[in-house]
Amino acid sequence: MSKSNPWQIGRRIAALRAAHGDSLRQAAARTGVSHTTIGRLESGQASASLNSTLRKIADGYGVTVEYLLTGRDPHREFEGALRRLPPEDRGRLYFASPLTRLRLVLQFLMSEYPAEFPPETLADRLSLSVEELRRLAGPGDLALTDDQVAAMAERLEQLTAIPAHWFMAGYVGQLTASIPPARLAAYARIIEKAAAAGIRPDVLEMAIDLLILQHGELAAEGPAAAKRDG
């Protein structure tokens, strides 16, 4: 991480606390960091040994450690970069492979945050060598499984707050408990097939509804059939 001004770190923490209407003791309850430590940080008494403390504060207030250190938010800036893409390019990302999305984020971090995320830092967080990182971020073919990409996505989420499910399926909303993130990539592939075949979304939705009804009928018939066979 790049060097940061302790006073600026303190101002960002104080601003987050004020935005949530927290007292020092309420901030301590939210973050798991003592109110005296938070008070010292806000007064500019930060040091390089406090990274684990800053992690707790960042997690408690839903920001990244990078934001506390530099004032920059990789998650928001990356989403802003995506919103500036032409609609057709943005749409293609929904059907891009997890590896393609992972590469896009790595290229963004390496180009936009060269001081904050040097190759050594990124490589370390992904459990790679610097050379492996450069190959991963480059254009060449790589044989990586979705599970390997998912593991890297989870580590990058900790570093940048970009949701891991975006890497796997391009989905940026809030997931309900009934939609595991791992399934979203499969759903995107189904939509891609329907679009390539010229199937309208409403027709696809009706087909899914019919499958749900059929599944329910088969499930209901199962116990009855078992009784007859018995």
Image (cartoon, helix red, strand yellow):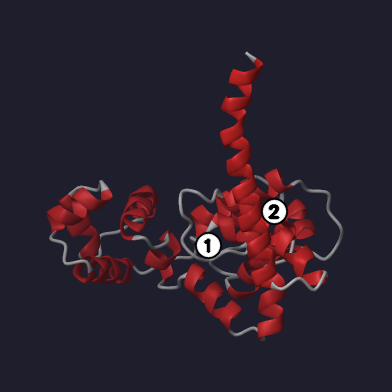
Q: Nearer the viewer, residue 88 or 115?
A: 88
Q: Earlier in the sequence, mark 2 or mark 1?
A: 1
Secondary element at tag 2: helix
Q: Residue at x 71, y 48 (%)?
A: 146
Return the residue at label 1: 162
The residue under label 2 is which amino acid type?
Ala
Q: What percent of the width, then of the height, locates residue 79? A: 54, 74
Q: Is residue 120 visible?
A: no
For the residues bearing labels 2 and 1, Cβ distance under 8 angstroms: no
Instruction: Give the quadrant of residue 170.
Output: bottom right
Q: Is residue 108 above or below residue 61?
A: below
Q: Residue at x 65, y 45 (%)?
A: 127
Q: Nearer the viewer, residue 182 or 199?
A: 199
Q: What percent of the width, then of the height, locates residue 37? A: 21, 52
Secondary element at tag 1: loop
Instruction: Pick out the residue farthest to the right.
Output: 141
In this rendering, the label closer to the viewer, 2 or 1: 2
- In this rendering, position of residue 180 left or right of residue 108: left
The residue under label 1 is which amino acid type?
Ile
- In this rendering, position of residue 168 left or right of residue 178: right
Residue 186, numbered label? 2
Instruction: Give the quadrant of residue 219.
Output: top right
Instruction: Give the quadrant of residue 24.
Output: bottom left
Q: What percent of the width, then of the height, locates residue 54? A: 35, 55
Question: Quadrant of the image for the C terminus?
Answer: top right
Q: Is residue 201 above or below residue 182?
A: below
Instruction: Pick out the residue farthest to the top.
Output: 230
* Alpha carbons under labels 2 and 1: distance apart: 20 Å
Q: Residue at x 58, y 42 (%)?
A: 216
